[in-house]
Image (cartoon, grey):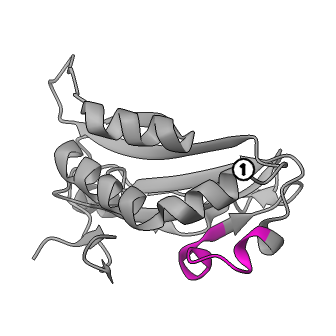
Amino acid sequence: MVGRRSFAQGRWDLPRHGSHVAQLWTLGGLSRVHPMDTFFEIRGSDFDVEDALRPSTLSERAKRWRRGESVGSSGKHVFRDSGFSVCIGGGDECDLDRQVADAMEFLRVESSEIRRLRALPEIEKTCLRFGEVWPKGIFGRSPLLPSQLLLACGQLGLDIVLCQYLETGISDDDKKST
């Protein structure tokens, strides 16, 4: 069974990573994610994450970071702002259409909370972040973001980020043998 997370289903199954799909780390190595996961992110230089999340319906699912904290285990880089992200869907077989459907459900259910957070004076950036993996040999694509998504994000003041990754072609088995 292919792992998939879905906000709409209220389930947060861990994805089973495909053998030829790159794996990523979220901000600061907070948790391992799949490149096709979808996130809601909010951030600001002087953003008090804990204060904003205290009354929030998103608090339990939020991955937090704070300005000045180390990014990753090397300690060479630090966060320039504070914020949080919430995974709202994704997994191995989660194409962009499924991510958009999950995002639309998230926006429908959490629109009041998103408006409350956006109204905080220290908020500088909010976005939905989508991921797409290009299979080996694909040199161009034209992903469609439907007008309903664009309108919903525009009404809530959300930017859209489409992260596109090239498939490496290196399987987990290949990594173990080197």
Instruction: Look at the image and give the residue range highlighted in magenta.
Output: 52-63
Side of 13 relative to 30 (left or right): left
The answer to whether residue 55 is magenta is yes
Left or right: residue 154 versus residue 66 is left
Q: Amino acid at mark 1?
A: Arg
Q: Is residue 164 left or right of residue 17?
A: right
| Local crowd size for mark 1, using a 10 Å CA cut-off: few (<14), some (14–19), many (≥20) | many
Residue at numbered disc 1: 43
Residue at point 59%, 71% (across, down): 62
Examine the structure image and report whether residue 112 is included in the region drawn in magenta: no
Give the residue displayed 34% in from the left and 70% down from the top. Answer: 7
Q: Position of residue 150 (x, y in %)?
A: 37, 33
Task: Give the image quarter of residue 106.
Answer: bottom left
Q: Nearer the viewer, residue 126 or 39?
A: 126
Q: Position of residue 174 (x, y in %)?
A: 25, 55
The quadrant in which residue 130 appears is top left
